[in-house]
Image (tube, rainbow, N blue to C red):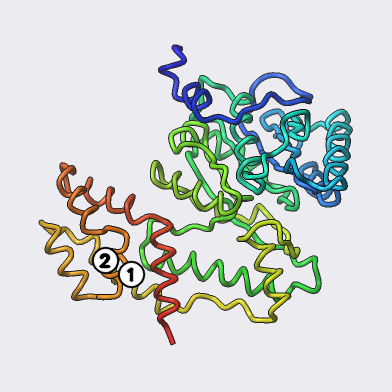
Amino acid sequence: MNKFKDPVAAYLAKRGLHLTPDYQNFSGFKEVVVVVPCYNELENLPFLLDSFLANDTSTFEKIASLFVINHPENAASEIKNSSSETVRLLTDFGSSSPLPVAIIDMPGAGREVPVKFAGAGYPRKTGLDSAISLTDHARPGNSLLVSVDADCLVAPSYFTRLVELAQRGCKAAVLEYKHREDDAENIEAIREYEACLRSYTDGLKYAGSPYAWHFIGSTMVSNVSTYVKAGGMNTRRAAEDFYFLENIAKVTKIESIEEVLVFPSNRVSDRVIFGTGKAMNDRKETGKAIKPYPPIVFERLKTFLSVYHEDYTSVEKLIDAIRKTDEETFVFLESCKFSIAMRSIYKSSKSGAQISNQKNIWFDALKTMRLVSLFRTSEP
């Protein structure tokens, strides 16, 4: 196939951060590649590896695990030493394990993470982009790229479910999760945090939002075709999973897999400005409980979405209906150039279905979260 007509080759040429693995104990393509960024995870990684090995070994011929050992170029010497030890640990594991293993040694010469990209997105993108080469390019719709973090554990059915998803042509999914409670000091905090996350997701489902799934990097699944079509992973230092899934949702439906397959850590961390570790750290420092979202905010969101997707014949009628329903919502929308966007959508769309789809794309996951946050702050 001409590389300029091949969307996968075009993506890698224009936007890819792909690297050839430094170590690989298998040959041939895999149906599923599980990508694991590893930054200073020498203590946690063996537990993830054990949970991998607890899976059905008959699935190993279809699975590859790709580990991306990384640290920023300005990392302290002990972090750099930890990276070297991690490479040795994984190389030893790969040489003795029945599980297919590939390793990208980003601490290698000239490959450390640039300081301006120090965070979660850059190594995750490098891993996912590089994983494409381990899949069958002729069948990008049947090859899955999966993300999981090195401080997680996975269920014994994890690989089996992933292979099933690949074989039935799953385009994108988020796997169900349950935070662990192995850090005794943070049990109450992690329960509060998870209840908060679930109150948001459940609230979006109730309101009828098309973005009603959780944004947890260790649960993300997409096939190669969808990954490329959505523009691939980003290099954000934090919240890379949120923006990645938002882009995925604009090109295909994201499935929610109900079986609990991933068990993230509940450890305290200050590595990034969002996420579980940061929430645990803030909870520990302030002592303030992490509260769930109040149901009233999703009542307001549901009302707005109902009006927003009414089949109005003109933008003026749509604007009038929203203003009569909730003026605060309209003021927020206008701060995002709502009227201008709607006039463009109505003018360029050829059908009601196309208008509705373009409305979903415009009022995306970020605008949804911002509006819900506005509602939450305005509640007494």
Residue positioned 68% across, 70% down in the render: 190
Q: Residue 94, percent across and down?
A: 83, 31
In this view of the protein, which residue sits in the foreground, 201 or 338? 338
Q: Is residue 217 above or below residue 289?
A: above
Please indicate whether residue 27 sits to the left or right of residue 85 in the image: left
Callout 1 crowding tier (Cα within 10 Å): few <14, some 14–19, many ≥20: some
In this view of the protein, which residue sits in the foreground, 319 or 26? 319
Q: Tag 2's secondary structure? A: helix
Q: Quadrant of residue 106?
A: top right
Q: Residue 21, percent across and down?
A: 72, 26
Q: Tag 1's secondary structure? A: helix
Q: Is residue 178 above or below residue 69?
A: below
Callout 2 crowding tier (Cα within 10 Å): few <14, some 14–19, many ≥20: few
Give the mark count. 2
| Three-letter code for the amino acid on which mark 2 is drawn | Ser
Please report contact status of discs 1 and 2: CB closer than 8 Å, yes or no.
yes
Q: Quadrant of residue 296?
A: bottom left
Q: Quadrant of the C terminus?
A: bottom left
Residue positioned 24% across, 62% down in the render: 308
- Residue under label 1, please give it: 302
Residue positioned 15% across, 42% down in the render: 350
Disc assigned to residue 306: 2
